[in-house]
Amino acid sequence: MAGLPAVIINFHGVKVTLPAGVSFSSDGAALSLDFSAGFTGTLQLQAVGGDTGAALGGHGVLPSAIQDTLAGASQDTMLAAPLPYWFNTSPGGTQERAAPECNTQDGAPQAGDSADRATHERQRLLPFLDAAASRDEPALAAGRSSGKENARASGGAASDKRKSSGKSGLSSGKRQRKGTPPSPATEMALRWRPLEVGEADQPLARWGATFTPLTTTQACLFGGAGEEGPLGDAWLLEAGGASGALRWHRAAAHDAVGRAWHAAALVATPEGQRMLAYGGERARPAEGMTKGEEDDEDDTETVGDATLLDADARLWVPMTLAGEGGKATPVRAGAAMAALPDGRALVFGGVDEAGRYRNDAYVLDSRRLNWFSLAGIARGAPPKTRAYHTATLVGDRVVVLGGLGPKCLWNLNEVYTLKVGSWAWREHTADVTGEAPSPRSGHSAVALPDGRSLLVFGGGNADSDVFFSSVAVLDTCTWAWSTPRLQGVARPCGRAGHAMALLQVEGRGHVLAVCAGRTSGDRLCRDTWLLELPASGQAVH
Protein backbone atom coordinates (compact mmCIF):
# COMPACT_ATOMS: atom_id res chain seq x y z
CA MET A 1 0.00 0.00 0.00
CA ALA A 2 2.62 2.52 1.04
CA GLY A 3 4.59 1.77 -2.11
CA LEU A 4 1.81 2.87 -4.43
CA PRO A 5 2.49 6.31 -5.92
CA ALA A 6 0.00 9.15 -5.89
CA VAL A 7 -1.73 9.68 -9.23
CA ILE A 8 -3.43 12.56 -10.96
CA ILE A 9 -6.72 11.80 -12.68
CA ASN A 10 -7.84 14.13 -15.44
CA PHE A 11 -11.55 13.45 -15.44
CA HIS A 12 -13.56 15.61 -17.85
CA GLY A 13 -11.25 18.56 -17.20
CA VAL A 14 -11.12 18.15 -13.42
CA LYS A 15 -7.72 17.19 -12.02
CA VAL A 16 -7.90 15.07 -8.86
CA THR A 17 -4.70 14.04 -7.07
CA LEU A 18 -5.17 10.83 -5.09
CA PRO A 19 -2.83 9.62 -2.34
CA ALA A 20 -1.89 5.98 -1.99
CA GLY A 21 -4.68 3.75 -0.77
CA VAL A 22 -7.59 5.40 -2.55
CA SER A 23 -9.13 3.21 -5.23
CA PHE A 24 -11.30 4.56 -7.99
CA SER A 25 -13.39 3.51 -10.95
CA SER A 26 -15.22 5.20 -13.79
CA ASP A 27 -17.90 4.28 -16.27
CA GLY A 28 -17.09 7.36 -18.34
CA ALA A 29 -20.04 9.32 -16.97
CA ALA A 30 -19.17 9.38 -13.28
CA LEU A 31 -16.01 9.01 -11.23
CA SER A 32 -16.34 6.91 -8.08
CA LEU A 33 -13.70 7.06 -5.33
CA ASP A 34 -13.44 4.62 -2.43
CA PHE A 35 -12.18 6.05 0.88
CA SER A 36 -13.32 3.07 2.93
CA ALA A 37 -9.77 1.97 3.83
CA GLY A 38 -8.84 5.45 5.06
CA PHE A 39 -5.74 7.23 3.81
CA THR A 40 -2.88 9.49 4.71
CA GLY A 41 -0.98 11.91 2.54
CA THR A 42 -2.37 14.59 0.27
CA LEU A 43 -5.74 14.73 -1.44
CA GLN A 44 -6.01 17.55 -3.98
CA LEU A 45 -8.76 18.85 -6.21
CA GLN A 46 -8.25 21.57 -8.77
CA ALA A 47 -10.66 24.50 -8.28
CA VAL A 48 -13.01 24.67 -11.24
CA GLY A 49 -16.04 26.78 -12.04
CA GLY A 50 -19.22 26.39 -14.01
CA ASP A 51 -20.18 22.93 -15.22
CA THR A 52 -16.65 21.66 -15.85
CA GLY A 53 -16.70 19.09 -13.10
CA ALA A 54 -20.40 18.40 -12.85
CA ALA A 55 -19.83 14.69 -13.48
CA LEU A 56 -18.23 14.38 -10.05
CA GLY A 57 -21.64 15.06 -8.55
CA GLY A 58 -22.70 11.55 -9.54
CA HIS A 59 -21.01 10.14 -6.47
CA GLY A 60 -23.18 10.97 -3.47
CA VAL A 61 -21.15 12.59 -0.72
CA LEU A 62 -17.88 12.89 -2.62
CA PRO A 63 -17.71 16.52 -3.79
CA SER A 64 -18.59 18.04 -0.42
CA ALA A 65 -16.37 15.57 1.39
CA ILE A 66 -13.41 16.59 -0.75
CA GLN A 67 -14.09 20.28 -0.32
CA ASP A 68 -14.43 20.10 3.47
CA THR A 69 -11.13 18.23 3.57
CA LEU A 70 -9.36 20.66 1.28
CA ALA A 71 -10.18 23.58 3.57
CA GLY A 72 -7.52 22.26 5.96
CA ALA A 73 -4.38 23.83 4.51
CA SER A 74 -2.70 25.45 1.54
CA GLN A 75 0.38 23.99 -0.10
CA ASP A 76 1.89 26.32 -2.68
CA THR A 77 -1.06 27.06 -4.94
CA MET A 78 -2.76 23.72 -4.39
CA LEU A 79 -5.18 23.02 -1.59
CA ALA A 80 -4.33 19.97 0.46
CA ALA A 81 -5.57 17.88 3.39
CA PRO A 82 -2.76 17.47 5.94
CA LEU A 83 -4.54 14.94 8.17
CA PRO A 84 -5.96 11.46 7.65
CA TYR A 85 -9.73 11.42 7.15
CA TRP A 86 -12.36 8.70 7.04
CA PHE A 87 -15.31 8.99 4.70
CA ASN A 88 -18.43 6.93 4.41
CA THR A 89 -19.01 6.86 0.67
CA SER A 90 -22.74 6.27 0.95
CA PRO A 91 -24.89 9.34 0.15
CA GLY A 92 -26.06 9.46 3.76
CA GLY A 93 -22.56 9.46 5.19
CA THR A 94 -21.14 12.33 7.18
CA GLN A 95 -18.90 14.84 5.44
CA GLU A 96 -17.06 16.03 8.51
CA ARG A 97 -15.96 13.05 10.58
CA ALA A 98 -12.22 12.84 11.21
CA ALA A 99 -10.46 9.47 11.10
CA PRO A 100 -8.40 7.88 13.85
CA GLU A 101 -4.73 8.79 13.57
CA CYS A 102 -2.71 6.37 11.44
CA ASN A 103 0.80 5.22 12.30
CA THR A 104 2.04 5.38 8.73
CA GLN A 105 2.78 8.77 7.22
CA ASP A 106 3.13 7.99 3.53
CA GLY A 107 0.42 5.42 2.93
CA ALA A 108 -3.00 4.29 4.07
CA PRO A 109 -3.67 1.62 6.72
CA GLN A 110 -2.75 -1.83 5.49
CA ALA A 111 -5.61 -3.59 3.71
CA GLY A 112 -4.75 -6.24 1.15
CA ASP A 113 -8.10 -6.18 -0.64
CA SER A 114 -8.04 -2.41 -0.97
CA ALA A 115 -4.47 -2.49 -2.27
CA ASP A 116 -5.36 -5.05 -4.94
CA ARG A 117 -8.46 -3.12 -5.95
CA ALA A 118 -6.51 0.14 -6.14
CA THR A 119 -3.85 -1.46 -8.34
CA HIS A 120 -6.48 -2.99 -10.60
CA GLU A 121 -8.38 0.27 -11.07
CA ARG A 122 -5.21 2.25 -11.76
CA GLN A 123 -4.26 -0.25 -14.47
CA ARG A 124 -7.76 -0.13 -15.99
CA LEU A 125 -7.97 3.67 -16.08
CA LEU A 126 -4.52 4.53 -17.42
CA PRO A 127 -6.03 6.68 -20.19
CA PHE A 128 -7.37 9.04 -17.50
CA LEU A 129 -4.03 9.54 -15.73
CA ASP A 130 -1.66 12.49 -16.09
CA ALA A 131 2.07 12.02 -15.61
CA ALA A 132 2.65 15.12 -13.49
CA ALA A 133 0.66 17.37 -11.20
CA SER A 134 -0.75 20.60 -12.54
CA ARG A 135 0.07 23.78 -10.57
CA ASP A 136 -2.28 26.18 -12.29
CA GLU A 137 -5.01 26.29 -9.64
CA PRO A 138 -5.73 29.81 -8.36
CA ALA A 139 -4.98 30.38 -4.70
CA LEU A 140 -7.68 31.22 -2.19
CA ALA A 141 -8.77 34.85 -2.22
CA ALA A 142 -7.82 35.30 1.41
CA GLY A 143 -5.41 37.39 3.39
CA ARG A 144 -3.18 36.42 6.31
CA SER A 145 -4.13 37.51 9.80
CA SER A 146 -1.98 37.44 12.90
CA GLY A 147 -2.67 35.95 16.28
CA LYS A 148 -3.07 39.49 17.59
CA GLU A 149 -5.79 40.18 15.07
CA ASN A 150 -7.63 37.05 16.12
CA ALA A 151 -7.56 38.23 19.73
CA ARG A 152 -8.98 41.60 18.68
CA ALA A 153 -11.72 40.00 16.66
CA SER A 154 -12.92 37.77 19.48
CA GLY A 155 -12.54 40.26 22.31
CA GLY A 156 -13.06 39.00 25.85
CA ALA A 157 -14.06 35.59 24.56
CA ALA A 158 -10.77 34.94 22.78
CA SER A 159 -9.33 32.49 25.28
CA ASP A 160 -12.60 30.59 25.56
CA LYS A 161 -12.91 30.36 21.78
CA ARG A 162 -9.47 28.78 21.52
CA LYS A 163 -10.01 26.37 24.42
CA SER A 164 -13.49 25.17 23.56
CA SER A 165 -14.09 21.53 22.73
CA GLY A 166 -17.22 20.47 20.89
CA LYS A 167 -19.67 17.80 21.91
CA SER A 168 -20.98 15.17 19.55
CA GLY A 169 -22.93 16.75 16.73
CA LEU A 170 -24.88 13.63 15.75
CA SER A 171 -28.58 13.47 16.57
CA SER A 172 -30.07 10.25 17.84
CA GLY A 173 -32.95 10.15 15.38
CA LYS A 174 -36.00 10.68 17.59
CA ARG A 175 -39.68 11.11 16.91
CA GLN A 176 -40.96 13.18 14.03
CA ARG A 177 -44.09 15.33 13.99
CA LYS A 178 -46.92 13.36 12.42
CA GLY A 179 -49.24 14.57 9.71
CA THR A 180 -46.81 17.12 8.26
CA PRO A 181 -45.47 16.51 4.73
CA PRO A 182 -41.72 16.95 4.27
CA SER A 183 -40.46 20.26 2.98
CA PRO A 184 -39.40 20.39 -0.69
CA ALA A 185 -36.17 21.94 0.61
CA THR A 186 -35.11 18.54 1.96
CA GLU A 187 -34.95 17.18 -1.61
CA MET A 188 -33.55 20.18 -3.44
CA ALA A 189 -30.28 20.35 -5.31
CA LEU A 190 -28.09 23.43 -4.99
CA ARG A 191 -25.14 24.81 -6.92
CA TRP A 192 -22.29 27.07 -5.81
CA ARG A 193 -20.97 29.72 -8.17
CA PRO A 194 -18.17 32.22 -7.45
CA LEU A 195 -18.94 35.88 -8.09
CA GLU A 196 -16.28 37.19 -10.45
CA VAL A 197 -15.21 40.70 -9.43
CA GLY A 198 -12.06 42.79 -9.66
CA GLU A 199 -9.79 43.40 -6.68
CA ALA A 200 -10.79 47.05 -6.41
CA ASP A 201 -14.50 46.29 -6.78
CA GLN A 202 -15.07 44.26 -3.65
CA PRO A 203 -14.76 44.66 0.15
CA LEU A 204 -11.49 43.93 1.93
CA ALA A 205 -10.97 40.56 3.63
CA ARG A 206 -12.66 40.43 7.04
CA TRP A 207 -14.67 38.34 9.48
CA GLY A 208 -17.26 39.22 12.10
CA ALA A 209 -19.17 41.49 9.68
CA THR A 210 -22.94 41.70 9.18
CA PHE A 211 -24.75 41.22 5.86
CA THR A 212 -28.28 42.63 5.98
CA PRO A 213 -30.86 42.47 3.15
CA LEU A 214 -32.27 45.97 2.58
CA THR A 215 -34.56 44.94 -0.29
CA THR A 216 -35.13 41.68 -2.15
CA THR A 217 -32.27 42.59 -4.52
CA GLN A 218 -29.87 44.47 -2.23
CA ALA A 219 -27.87 43.59 0.91
CA CYS A 220 -25.44 45.66 3.00
CA LEU A 221 -22.12 44.30 4.29
CA PHE A 222 -20.93 46.36 7.24
CA GLY A 223 -17.86 46.34 9.47
CA GLY A 224 -15.98 43.26 10.58
CA ALA A 225 -12.40 42.66 11.71
CA GLY A 226 -9.79 43.10 8.98
CA GLU A 227 -6.04 42.72 8.91
CA GLU A 228 -5.53 45.86 11.01
CA GLY A 229 -8.58 45.67 13.27
CA PRO A 230 -12.27 46.64 13.13
CA LEU A 231 -13.48 48.16 9.85
CA GLY A 232 -16.05 50.92 9.43
CA ASP A 233 -16.93 50.63 5.75
CA ALA A 234 -20.28 49.60 4.27
CA TRP A 235 -20.77 47.89 0.90
CA LEU A 236 -23.91 47.08 -1.08
CA LEU A 237 -24.26 43.90 -3.11
CA GLU A 238 -27.16 44.41 -5.48
CA ALA A 239 -28.60 43.25 -8.76
CA GLY A 240 -28.69 45.89 -11.47
CA GLY A 241 -28.47 46.61 -15.15
CA ALA A 242 -30.15 44.77 -17.98
CA SER A 243 -28.56 41.47 -16.99
CA GLY A 244 -29.50 41.76 -13.33
CA ALA A 245 -25.97 40.71 -12.40
CA LEU A 246 -24.85 41.16 -8.79
CA ARG A 247 -22.20 43.82 -8.20
CA TRP A 248 -20.48 45.33 -5.18
CA HIS A 249 -20.28 49.09 -4.61
CA ARG A 250 -19.47 51.19 -1.58
CA ALA A 251 -22.53 52.41 0.32
CA ALA A 252 -21.19 54.73 3.01
CA ALA A 253 -18.25 55.01 5.35
CA HIS A 254 -18.76 54.82 9.09
CA ASP A 255 -16.52 56.68 11.53
CA ALA A 256 -12.82 55.84 11.57
CA VAL A 257 -13.28 53.48 14.52
CA GLY A 258 -15.38 50.77 12.89
CA ARG A 259 -16.78 47.70 14.61
CA ALA A 260 -16.80 43.90 14.43
CA TRP A 261 -18.91 41.11 15.96
CA HIS A 262 -21.86 43.49 16.13
CA ALA A 263 -25.45 42.64 15.19
CA ALA A 264 -27.62 44.19 12.49
CA ALA A 265 -31.15 43.98 11.09
CA LEU A 266 -33.57 45.92 8.92
CA VAL A 267 -35.96 47.79 11.24
CA ALA A 268 -38.77 50.33 11.05
CA THR A 269 -38.15 54.00 11.91
CA PRO A 270 -40.35 57.12 11.62
CA GLU A 271 -38.52 57.86 8.34
CA GLY A 272 -38.99 54.36 6.90
CA GLN A 273 -36.92 51.18 6.97
CA ARG A 274 -33.28 51.49 7.97
CA MET A 275 -30.46 49.11 8.84
CA LEU A 276 -29.79 49.08 12.58
CA ALA A 277 -26.25 48.14 13.70
CA TYR A 278 -25.83 47.45 17.40
CA GLY A 279 -23.04 46.58 19.83
CA GLY A 280 -19.90 44.71 18.85
CA GLU A 281 -16.23 45.50 19.33
CA ARG A 282 -14.47 48.66 18.22
CA ALA A 283 -10.94 49.99 18.48
CA ARG A 284 -10.30 51.49 21.90
CA PRO A 285 -9.70 55.27 21.68
CA ALA A 286 -6.06 56.14 22.41
CA GLU A 287 -6.98 59.13 24.55
CA GLY A 288 -7.76 58.21 28.11
CA MET A 289 -6.07 54.80 27.92
CA THR A 290 -3.89 53.75 30.83
CA LYS A 291 -0.34 52.49 30.30
CA GLY A 292 -1.51 48.94 30.95
CA GLU A 293 -4.29 49.27 28.37
CA GLU A 294 -1.84 50.68 25.80
CA ASP A 295 0.37 47.61 26.25
CA ASP A 296 -2.60 45.23 26.04
CA GLU A 297 -2.47 43.14 22.85
CA ASP A 298 -6.26 43.30 22.62
CA ASP A 299 -6.90 46.95 21.79
CA THR A 300 -10.68 46.67 21.31
CA GLU A 301 -13.57 47.39 23.63
CA THR A 302 -17.07 45.92 23.71
CA VAL A 303 -19.84 48.49 23.19
CA GLY A 304 -23.62 48.75 23.38
CA ASP A 305 -24.38 51.73 21.16
CA ALA A 306 -26.60 51.70 18.08
CA THR A 307 -26.57 53.47 14.72
CA LEU A 308 -28.84 53.58 11.66
CA LEU A 309 -27.82 53.49 7.99
CA ASP A 310 -29.80 55.39 5.39
CA ALA A 311 -28.43 53.63 2.30
CA ASP A 312 -30.09 56.05 -0.13
CA ALA A 313 -28.58 59.11 1.56
CA ARG A 314 -25.32 57.26 2.27
CA LEU A 315 -25.61 58.53 5.82
CA TRP A 316 -25.12 57.03 9.29
CA VAL A 317 -27.27 58.38 12.14
CA PRO A 318 -26.33 57.59 15.77
CA MET A 319 -29.34 56.45 17.80
CA THR A 320 -29.93 56.35 21.54
CA LEU A 321 -32.43 53.79 22.85
CA ALA A 322 -33.63 54.22 26.42
CA GLY A 323 -34.75 51.37 28.61
CA GLU A 324 -36.71 51.40 31.85
CA GLY A 325 -35.50 54.30 33.99
CA GLY A 326 -33.43 55.61 31.08
CA LYS A 327 -31.14 52.59 31.18
CA ALA A 328 -28.80 52.29 28.18
CA THR A 329 -28.81 49.26 25.90
CA PRO A 330 -26.65 46.38 27.17
CA VAL A 331 -23.02 46.10 26.08
CA ARG A 332 -22.71 43.06 23.80
CA ALA A 333 -20.48 41.43 21.19
CA GLY A 334 -21.16 38.20 19.34
CA ALA A 335 -24.91 38.54 19.98
CA ALA A 336 -27.52 37.45 17.43
CA MET A 337 -30.25 39.77 16.14
CA ALA A 338 -33.45 38.89 14.30
CA ALA A 339 -35.74 41.37 12.55
CA LEU A 340 -39.31 40.92 13.86
CA PRO A 341 -42.45 41.17 11.68
CA ASP A 342 -43.52 44.45 13.34
CA GLY A 343 -40.28 46.26 12.49
CA ARG A 344 -38.56 45.81 15.85
CA ALA A 345 -35.49 43.65 16.46
CA LEU A 346 -34.81 40.85 18.95
CA VAL A 347 -31.32 40.44 20.44
CA PHE A 348 -30.23 37.26 22.20
CA GLY A 349 -27.02 36.20 23.94
CA GLY A 350 -23.51 37.44 23.29
CA VAL A 351 -20.57 38.44 25.47
CA ASP A 352 -20.73 41.42 27.83
CA GLU A 353 -18.01 43.93 28.74
CA ALA A 354 -16.60 41.56 31.38
CA GLY A 355 -16.27 38.69 28.88
CA ARG A 356 -19.20 36.77 30.37
CA TYR A 357 -21.47 34.74 28.10
CA ARG A 358 -25.13 35.75 28.33
CA ASN A 359 -28.51 34.21 27.54
CA ASP A 360 -30.75 37.23 28.01
CA ALA A 361 -33.13 38.49 25.34
CA TYR A 362 -34.40 42.00 24.69
CA VAL A 363 -36.29 43.92 22.03
CA LEU A 364 -35.04 47.10 20.33
CA ASP A 365 -37.70 49.52 19.08
CA SER A 366 -36.25 52.16 16.75
CA ARG A 367 -39.62 53.85 16.19
CA ARG A 368 -40.22 54.60 19.86
CA LEU A 369 -36.48 54.89 20.61
CA ASN A 370 -36.65 52.43 23.48
CA TRP A 371 -35.78 48.87 24.39
CA PHE A 372 -37.09 46.38 26.92
CA SER A 373 -35.81 43.14 28.42
CA LEU A 374 -37.81 39.91 28.19
CA ALA A 375 -36.70 38.96 31.70
CA GLY A 376 -39.87 38.46 33.72
CA ILE A 377 -41.94 38.52 30.52
CA ALA A 378 -40.77 35.47 28.57
CA ARG A 379 -42.11 32.05 29.55
CA GLY A 380 -40.10 28.84 29.55
CA ALA A 381 -36.37 28.24 29.90
CA PRO A 382 -34.13 30.12 27.45
CA PRO A 383 -31.14 28.52 25.70
CA LYS A 384 -27.92 28.24 27.69
CA THR A 385 -25.41 31.09 27.62
CA ARG A 386 -23.68 31.51 24.27
CA ALA A 387 -22.19 33.85 21.67
CA TYR A 388 -21.38 33.69 17.93
CA HIS A 389 -24.63 31.74 17.39
CA THR A 390 -27.57 32.44 15.06
CA ALA A 391 -31.11 33.64 15.77
CA THR A 392 -33.31 33.54 12.67
CA LEU A 393 -36.97 34.43 12.20
CA VAL A 394 -38.93 31.62 10.52
CA GLY A 395 -42.65 32.37 10.44
CA ASP A 396 -43.56 33.69 13.89
CA ARG A 397 -40.68 32.00 15.74
CA VAL A 398 -37.05 32.92 16.21
CA VAL A 399 -34.85 29.81 15.92
CA VAL A 400 -31.60 29.77 17.95
CA LEU A 401 -28.81 27.42 16.83
CA GLY A 402 -25.25 26.60 17.86
CA GLY A 403 -22.70 29.04 19.17
CA LEU A 404 -19.90 29.08 21.71
CA GLY A 405 -20.46 28.72 25.45
CA PRO A 406 -18.04 29.21 28.35
CA LYS A 407 -16.68 25.68 27.99
CA CYS A 408 -17.97 24.13 24.77
CA LEU A 409 -19.49 24.51 21.34
CA TRP A 410 -23.23 23.89 21.32
CA ASN A 411 -24.78 21.08 19.29
CA LEU A 412 -27.02 22.03 16.39
CA ASN A 413 -29.48 19.31 17.35
CA GLU A 414 -30.20 21.42 20.46
CA VAL A 415 -32.82 23.66 18.88
CA TYR A 416 -34.65 26.45 20.71
CA THR A 417 -37.42 28.75 19.51
CA LEU A 418 -38.94 31.94 20.88
CA LYS A 419 -42.56 32.62 19.85
CA VAL A 420 -42.93 36.26 18.85
CA GLY A 421 -45.63 38.09 20.80
CA SER A 422 -46.24 35.49 23.51
CA TRP A 423 -42.47 35.40 24.14
CA ALA A 424 -42.52 31.71 24.98
CA TRP A 425 -39.25 29.78 24.84
CA ARG A 426 -39.40 26.14 23.77
CA GLU A 427 -36.71 23.50 23.36
CA HIS A 428 -37.18 21.09 20.43
CA THR A 429 -34.15 18.86 20.98
CA ALA A 430 -36.31 15.78 21.66
CA ASP A 431 -38.10 16.30 18.32
CA VAL A 432 -35.00 16.66 16.15
CA THR A 433 -34.30 13.91 13.61
CA GLY A 434 -31.69 13.42 10.92
CA GLU A 435 -27.98 14.07 11.17
CA ALA A 436 -27.41 17.54 12.55
CA PRO A 437 -24.27 19.47 11.61
CA SER A 438 -21.44 19.07 14.09
CA PRO A 439 -21.07 21.58 16.97
CA ARG A 440 -19.86 24.96 15.74
CA SER A 441 -19.88 28.71 16.16
CA GLY A 442 -19.53 31.53 13.66
CA HIS A 443 -21.88 29.79 11.22
CA SER A 444 -24.67 31.51 9.28
CA ALA A 445 -28.36 30.63 9.04
CA VAL A 446 -30.98 32.06 6.67
CA ALA A 447 -34.72 31.36 6.35
CA LEU A 448 -35.56 29.97 2.90
CA PRO A 449 -38.42 31.26 0.70
CA ASP A 450 -40.64 28.25 1.52
CA GLY A 451 -41.39 29.84 4.90
CA ARG A 452 -40.48 26.77 6.94
CA SER A 453 -36.86 25.81 6.23
CA LEU A 454 -33.61 27.16 7.62
CA LEU A 455 -30.32 26.76 5.74
CA VAL A 456 -27.05 26.63 7.68
CA PHE A 457 -23.64 27.11 6.09
CA GLY A 458 -20.11 27.02 7.48
CA GLY A 459 -18.94 27.66 11.00
CA GLY A 460 -16.07 26.06 12.83
CA ASN A 461 -14.11 25.19 15.92
CA ALA A 462 -11.28 27.68 16.37
CA ASP A 463 -9.58 25.49 18.97
CA SER A 464 -8.76 22.80 16.41
CA ASP A 465 -8.56 25.20 13.43
CA VAL A 466 -11.43 23.37 11.73
CA PHE A 467 -13.79 25.30 9.47
CA PHE A 468 -16.69 23.70 7.60
CA SER A 469 -18.02 24.28 4.08
CA SER A 470 -21.03 21.99 4.39
CA VAL A 471 -24.66 22.99 3.84
CA ALA A 472 -27.54 21.67 5.94
CA VAL A 473 -31.28 22.40 6.01
CA LEU A 474 -33.55 22.27 9.07
CA ASP A 475 -37.29 21.85 8.45
CA THR A 476 -38.95 23.77 11.30
CA CYS A 477 -42.27 21.97 10.76
CA THR A 478 -40.82 18.48 11.32
CA TRP A 479 -37.50 19.42 13.01
CA ALA A 480 -35.68 17.16 10.57
CA TRP A 481 -32.13 17.94 9.42
CA SER A 482 -31.19 17.07 5.86
CA THR A 483 -28.21 17.56 3.56
CA PRO A 484 -29.09 19.01 0.14
CA ARG A 485 -27.46 17.55 -2.92
CA LEU A 486 -24.78 19.90 -4.25
CA GLN A 487 -24.30 19.94 -8.01
CA GLY A 488 -20.91 20.59 -9.59
CA VAL A 489 -17.57 20.70 -7.79
CA ALA A 490 -16.98 24.42 -7.26
CA ARG A 491 -17.22 25.20 -3.53
CA PRO A 492 -16.18 27.98 -1.15
CA CYS A 493 -13.55 26.97 1.38
CA GLY A 494 -14.66 26.15 4.92
CA ARG A 495 -15.04 29.31 6.98
CA ALA A 496 -16.53 30.92 10.08
CA GLY A 497 -17.44 34.48 10.97
CA HIS A 498 -18.62 34.96 7.39
CA ALA A 499 -21.82 36.68 6.25
CA MET A 500 -24.77 35.32 4.26
CA ALA A 501 -27.88 36.97 2.81
CA LEU A 502 -30.83 35.87 0.65
CA LEU A 503 -31.33 37.86 -2.58
CA GLN A 504 -33.37 37.66 -5.77
CA VAL A 505 -31.62 37.82 -9.13
CA GLU A 506 -33.46 38.43 -12.40
CA GLY A 507 -33.71 35.21 -14.38
CA ARG A 508 -32.03 33.17 -11.67
CA GLY A 509 -34.50 33.28 -8.78
CA HIS A 510 -33.24 33.24 -5.21
CA VAL A 511 -29.57 32.99 -4.34
CA LEU A 512 -27.71 32.97 -1.04
CA ALA A 513 -24.73 35.31 -1.19
CA VAL A 514 -21.80 34.36 1.08
CA CYS A 515 -18.78 36.57 1.64
CA ALA A 516 -15.86 37.18 4.01
CA GLY A 517 -15.00 34.93 6.98
CA ARG A 518 -11.97 33.28 8.49
CA THR A 519 -10.57 29.97 7.26
CA SER A 520 -7.81 27.69 8.54
CA GLY A 521 -4.32 29.04 9.06
CA ASP A 522 -5.66 32.36 10.43
CA ARG A 523 -6.53 33.53 6.92
CA LEU A 524 -9.25 36.05 6.17
CA CYS A 525 -11.45 35.55 3.11
CA ARG A 526 -12.29 38.19 0.52
CA ASP A 527 -14.22 36.09 -1.98
CA THR A 528 -17.97 36.12 -2.68
CA TRP A 529 -19.98 33.00 -3.53
CA LEU A 530 -23.57 32.52 -4.68
CA LEU A 531 -25.56 29.43 -3.70
CA GLU A 532 -28.27 29.08 -6.32
CA LEU A 533 -31.61 27.80 -5.01
CA PRO A 534 -34.28 25.97 -7.05
CA ALA A 535 -37.33 27.89 -8.20
CA SER A 536 -39.99 28.33 -5.52
CA GLY A 537 -41.85 25.09 -4.88
CA GLN A 538 -39.56 23.11 -7.17
CA ALA A 539 -37.77 20.06 -5.81
CA VAL A 540 -34.74 19.25 -7.95
CA HIS A 541 -33.53 15.65 -7.85
Image: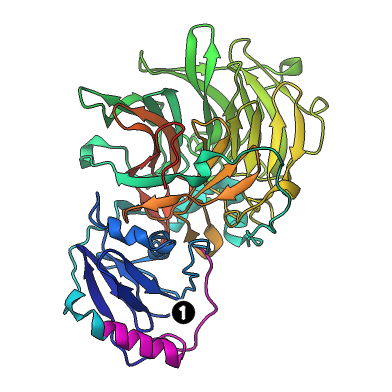
Q: Is residue 526 visible?
A: no
| Residue 522 image offset from top left, x and y in percent | 42, 58
Q: Is residue 399 visible?
A: yes
Relative height, residue 406 to residue 506 (above, below) = below
Of residue 401 and residue 428, the one placed in the foreground of this image is 428
Of residue 66 and residue 233, the one placed in the foreground of this image is 66
Magenta residues span: 96-122
Residue 361: quadrant of the picture: top right
| Residue 17 image offset from top left, x and y in percent | 28, 73
Q: Residue at x 65, y 62 (%)?
A: 168
| Mark 1 crowdedness (10 Å alpha carbons): few <14, some 14-19, many ≥20 | many
Left or right relative to 482: residue 15? left
Q: Residue at x 73, y 43 (%)?
A: 428
Residue extending farthest top:
270
Left or right relative to 511: residue 85? right
Quarter of the image for the N terminus: give it: bottom left
Give yes or no for residue 97 being in the magenta stretch.
Answer: yes
Tag 1: residue type?
Answer: Gly
Residue holding disc 1: 38
| Residue 103 image offset from top left, x and y in percent | 49, 88
| Residue 166 image offset from top left, x and y in percent | 63, 60
Q: Residue at x 38, y 64 (%)?
A: 70
Give yes or no for residue 172 being in the magenta stretch.
Answer: no
